[in-house]
Amino acid sequence: MGNAWALYAHPDVTPHPLKDPSFDPLYGFPNGRKPREMIATEEQMQSAKLPLEERGYCAHKLLEYYSCRADVWPWAAKCHHERHNYLNCEYEDYILRLKEYEREKRLLHRKKRRIQEKKIVE
């Protein structure tokens, strides 16, 4: 089931893609979580003229790739290692965001199930 349809059909258990998580990000992590930090600064991204859609957690890898391409142009294929690192970072970021979405979805299902169980007991 697609996210748009799930959000329409089951809005109570489907996380909204444009809103922040409704549960505590540390809930279920007794030892805490490693915080995600931006490595590239805003000044670096502005000076490199990165578009807003590319200013994510992998911007530092993208800046390395662009720098390599500028250094070895017209042999940009020599920068395959930097490109691979950037694409791998983007993939890992995607997987992490997907896991966060699924976690939110499971917690919403759990919340709904517990409310229904309380109604049955009463």
Image (cartoon, helix red, strand yellow):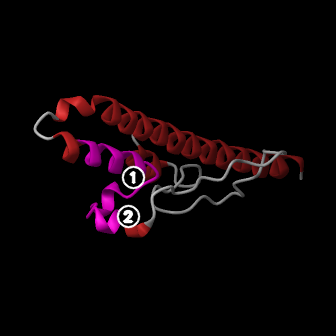
Position of 93 with respect to 106 (left or right) is left
Magenta stretch, main secondary structure, is: helix
Q: Is residue 17 magenta?
A: no
Residue displayed at 32% across by 63% down:
52
In the rendering, at what x and y percent does residue 56 appear?
42, 55
| Residue 29 in view of the camera | yes
Query: On the rendered structure, is 31 left or right of 11?
Result: right
* Local crowd size for mark 2, using a 10 Å CA cut-off: few (<14), some (14–19), many (≥20): few
The quadrant holding residue 46 is bottom left
22 or 10: which is nearer to us? Answer: 22
**Residue 29 got which mark?**
none
| Residue appearing at x 69%, y 48% in the figure | 34
The disc, 2 or 1, on the residue closer to the chain's N-terminal end is 2
| Residue range corresponding to the magenta coloring | 44-68
Number of marks drawn = 2
The answer to the question of whether label 2 and label 1 lie on touching residues, with beta carbons closer than 8 A, is yes
Residue placed furthest toward the front: 71
Q: Amino acid at mark 2?
A: Gln
Quarter of the picture holding the N terminus = top left
Front tag of 2 and 1: 2
Which residue appears at 44% of the width and 39% of the height? 89
Determine the residue positioned at 89% across, 47% down: 121
Q: Which residue is mark 2?
A: 44
Element assignment for label 2: helix
Q: Confirm whether the magenta stretch covers residue 54.
A: yes
